[in-house]
Amino acid sequence: MDKNILQTLSIKVSPINDHVLYFYDGRDLSGEPDFLTQENSWIYYGAMSLGLATYAIHKGNKAVVFDSMSHPLQGEWVKNYLRSIGIKHFTLVNSHWHLDHVAGNASYKDDDIIATYLTRKALETNKQAIEEGTTDLGPPGISVVLPNIAYYDNLTLYLDDLRIELLNFNIHTDDGTCLYIPQDKILFAGDMLEDTVTFILNPEDMPTHIAELNRMKELDIKAIYPNHGDPEVIASGGYDKTFIDATIDYDTKMLARAHDANFHESTIEDLAGDSIGKGWVHYFEPYEEVHKLNLKTVSDYYRDKDIPSLK
């Protein structure tokens, strides 16, 4: 790997506690290399414009890394950093199959990579299109390195004496993994929670998403760390359970109003304003595009369908 290229990256590193690090890139794109900021790229729209975090839980010379970022060079940068602080043994966990979370998997090709069986299946099914850059997201293509360990429902890992739980929730996508550390009461949420608003891709599953968010709330959580969130909130201790409430509220209002005559004109303020006002989430202008896509996705799907009850 060309060290000069790696040195052009602007990834920020900060401790969450004595055994968790977070790595953050994006939002402020000044000085970022061209391959991360090309506006016709899913790397830009899927990750860098919104900001992207990944996390490493470490003990001694071992680490569990949660997601591999949105470009192979970012994945290599993170692994090199961890090597520089003495990490020799790596386990990578993929939160879900979307490209901005698996693009750096190649850096871990000789390590264990864990995901749900649905994540592995999606990557297998779409492998050729992903590598050719011909998915719905378009270019660039990336090398697909598949998880070699796949689980159903939940999986428990131990990093020395630290218990780590991998939990499958059908939120955002049905293959999603969140990582929970019971000792710390910390939840790493992947794309199940985003600040400002969630990305709705499967409107037919919205009642399930809401039910699953309520199931997530049953966990004993002190702090939540998303992959797409406000770096200042992440650095200052993360989000609390109201982050889940904000997502439930947005999804519920989106679903309930899908047949309204002026639904397409609904603003972020209309559907997330209460949560923003309470400080549960924070307005970030690039999420306007996500919100507009959500309106279209939900409207198109429910145009000729009854809105399901959430009771």
Image (spheres, rainbow, N blue to C red):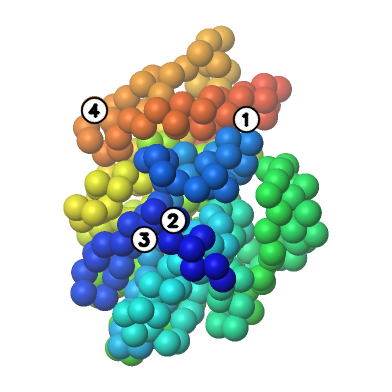
What is the secondary structure assignment of the residue under circle 2? loop
Instruction: Find the distance from the CA under tag 3 to the CA under tag 1.
Output: 31 Å
At label 1, counting other C-alpha atoms closer than 10 Å, the crowd grade (few under 14, some 14-19, many 20 or more) is some
Q: Which residue is mark 1?
A: 297
Instruction: Find the distance from the CA under tag 4 to the CA under tag 2.
Output: 35 Å
Q: Position of residue 208 (x, y in %)?
A: 54, 47
- Amino acid at the residue labelled 1: Thr
Q: Residue furthest front?
A: 4
**Camera sees residue 219:** no
Which is nearer the N-term, disc 4 or disc 3? Answer: 3
- Amino acid at the residue labelled 2: Leu
Instruction: Find the distance from the CA under tag 1 to the CA under tag 4.
Output: 26 Å
Relative vertical location of residue 100 with respect to residue 41 in this rendering, above or below: below
Q: Which residue is mark 2?
A: 9
User: Mark 2, mark 1: which one is toward the viewer?
Assistant: 2
At label 3, counting other C-alpha atoms closer than 10 Å, the crowd grade (few under 14, some 14-19, many 20 or more) is many
User: Mark 3, mark 1: which one is toward the viewer?
Assistant: 3
Which is nearer the N-term, disc 3 or disc 1? Answer: 3
Circle number at residue 277: 4
Q: Residue at x 36, y 21 (%)?
A: 269
- Amino acid at the residue labelled 4: Gly
Q: Residue at x 51, y 60 (%)?
A: 5
